[in-house]
Amino acid sequence: QVQLVESGGGLVQPGGSLRLSCASSGRIFSIADMAWHRQAPGKQRELVARISSDGSTNYADSVEGRFTISRDNAKKATYLQMNSLKPEDTAVYYCRVFVYWGQGIQVTVSS
């Protein structure tokens, strides 16, 4: 059984920063792909950032240069550092490891 729990979300002003964490439990392999997705009301879920076991990363064009994904295989965790946040970043953010998903955490960017 695999469980993923996100933390670190909340309300932040435009231009601010947040760091999301995703803690995993259960059987997670170090080779598993890890990613963050988000979904805003009325919109489709989109890939925000992805990191492979070798550290290679991919980002959505909308967050490139502002967000940084990282992973800690020893802790079986992944993180998303979000800087220079914009109102359009407002969404529920989901952690994904392989085919397993967290419950999601709200990020609201508003003044």
Image (tube, rainbow, N blue to C red):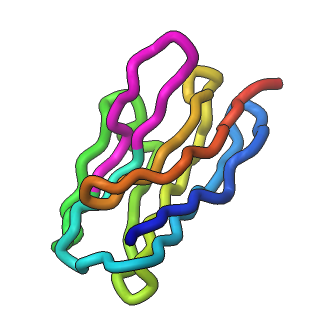
- How far from the left and from the top, in percent, is residue 21? 56, 63
Closer-to-camera residue (99/77): 99
- Above or below, 44 against 33 in this view is above
Closer-to-camera residue (67/30): 30
81 drawn magenta: no
- Above or below, 60 against 2 in this view is above
- How far from the left and from the top, in percent, is residue 65? 40, 43
- Identify the magenta region: 37-50
Q: Would residue 28 appear left or right of 94 to someone viewing this image?
A: left
Residue 75 falls in which quadrant of the image? Answer: bottom left
- How far from the left and from the top, in percent, is residue 108? 70, 32
Residue ID at (38%, 71%)? 1
Viewport quadrant of the C terminus = top right
The residue furthest bottom is 74
- Above or below, 5 against 61 in this view is below
Q: Would residue 63 appear left or right of 7 to someone viewing this image?
A: left
The residue furthest top is 42
Residue ID at (47%, 72%)? 24
Q: Would residue 56 appear left or right of 1 to someone viewing this image?
A: left
43 drawn magenta: yes
Closer-to-camera residue (70/99): 99
Q: Would residue 21 appear left or right of 68 to someone viewing this image?
A: right
The residue furthest right is 111
- How far from the left and from the top, in percent, is residue 27? 33, 79
How many marks do you count on the picture? 0
